Amino acid sequence: MPVSTFLWFDGRAEEAAAHYTKLFADSAIHAVERGPDGAATTVTFELSGQRFIAYNGGPRFDFTGAVSLYADCETQEEVDTLWAGLTDGGAEGPGGSLTDRFGVTWQVIPKAMGELLAEAEPDAARRILTAIHAMKKIDIQGLADARGH
């Protein structure tokens, strides 16, 4: 039984799906269901192998930071590119989090962050965590510098 993330939008489901599929490799819009007026009601799309359903349900619900989408980036270039695309019209948050123009919260995290923390002695781990909390977009070199060599 497949499980998908269901996102409730106020009239911007198709716009959001188009935006997201431009930012992620191996992504596509698979189906758009339209109402009698031609407006999209439901958009099924995939981001890097993960299926999403975007629904234009109206203003009844808003997104909150209690649920976020997590992007596990391989390189600083991936972090930078994704960060730029998702913060365009959105807002930066602390420690690699942001809210995009649609109100969806994201965590844009480089894999190196976990690796640096896993390999760090306790004092170095505290320095890395302090650096993370001071950052908005995560900077891998800044984390490595905080760890010390």
Image: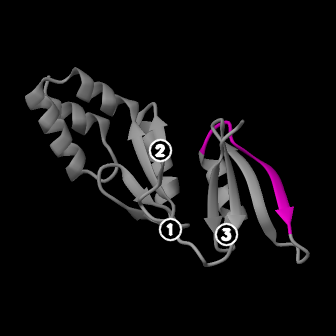
| Disc 1 to disc 3: CB gap under 8 Å | no
Residue depicted at x 63% and y 65%: 8
In screen coordinates, is 45 left or right of 47?
Answer: right
* Mark 3 nearby-residue class (10 Å; few <14, some 14–19, many ≥20): some
Vertical position of residue 27 compared to residue 10: above or below: above
Neighbours of disc 1 within 10 Å: few (<14), some (14-19), many (20+): few
Q: Is residue 18 visible?
A: no
Q: Residue at x 30, y 53 (%)?
A: 136
Q: CA distance from mark 2 to mark 1?
A: 19 Å
- Which residue position is annotated with label 1? 89
Element marked by disc 1: loop
Number of other residues with Cα within 10 Å of mark 2, as a class: few under 14, some 14 to 19, many 20 or more: few
> The residue under label 3 is which amino acid type?
Arg
* Residue stretch in magenta: 24-34
Spatial separation of the CA atoms under disc 2 and disc 3: 21 Å
Where is the C terminus found, in terms of image quarters? top left
Figure colour scheme:
one colour
Q: Is residue 143 above or below residue 149?
A: below
Position of the N terminus by quadrant? top right
Q: Which residue type does callout 1 highlight? A: Gly
- Identify which amino acid the numbered label 2 is placed on: Tyr
Whether residue 1 is visible here, answered yes or no, is yes
Which numbered circle lies on residue 112? Answer: none
**Alpha-carbon distance for marks 1 and 3?**
14 Å
Task: Give the residue number, with chain letter if any, for mark 3.
Answer: 12
Q: Nearer the viewer, residue 64 or 31?
A: 64
Read off the residue under disc 2.
70
